[in-house]
């Protein structure tokens, strides 16, 4: 179940919403002003690793992994890949 982040175009409030389907997404309203005028924004993400100590002591290792992930297509958002690759 994806949790998306949105930015309300009317009042500028940024919020998160659990969205189960495309139909539900059409009904997402800003919790501050109630407007349906919002756009989805890109979120940060977390990453699990089998060797967390490596990342804690070697920042370049984390940078390498993040670069590798950034170069991979975004799963589930293939229609946006044309804009970022």
Image (tube, helix red, strand yellow):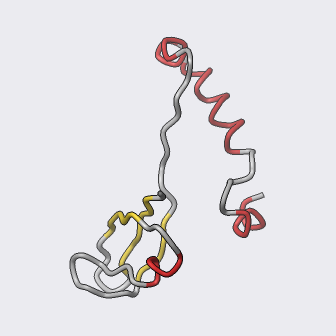
Q: From the viewer's perspective, is residue 53 above or below residue 10?
A: above
Q: Residue at x 48, y 71 (%)?
A: 40
**Which one is in front, 48 or 72?**
48
Q: Is residue 78 left or right of residue 4?
A: right
> Could you say where residue 11 lies in the image, as x and y percent from the top left?
28, 82
Q: Choose top left, top right, bottom left or bottom right for residue 69.
A: top right
Q: Residue at x 46, y 77 (%)?
A: 25
**Which one is in front, 25 or 20?**
20
> Could you say where residue 15 lies in the image, as x and y percent from the top left?
32, 66
Q: Is residue 8 left or right of residue 65?
A: left
Q: Choose top left, top right, bottom left or bottom right for residue 83.
A: bottom right
Placement of the C terminus among the 4 image quadrants:
bottom right
Q: From the viewer's perspective, is residue 50 above or below residue 82?
A: above
Q: Residue at x 46, y 67 (%)?
A: 20
> Could you say where residue 54 lies in the image, as x and y percent from the top left?
54, 13
**Which one is in front, 3 or 9?**
3
């Amino acid at each position: 179940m994806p949790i998306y982040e949105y930015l309300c175009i009317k009042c500028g409030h940024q919020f998160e919403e659990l969205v189960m389907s495309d139909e539900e997404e059409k009904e997402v309203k800003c919790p501050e002003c109630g407007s349906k005028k919002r756009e989805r924004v890109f979120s940060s993400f977390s990453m699990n690793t089998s060797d967390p100590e490596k990342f804690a002591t070697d920042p370049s290792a984390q940078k390498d992994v993040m670069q590798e992930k950034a170069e991979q297509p975004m799963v589930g958002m293939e229609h946006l890949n044309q804009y970022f690759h």
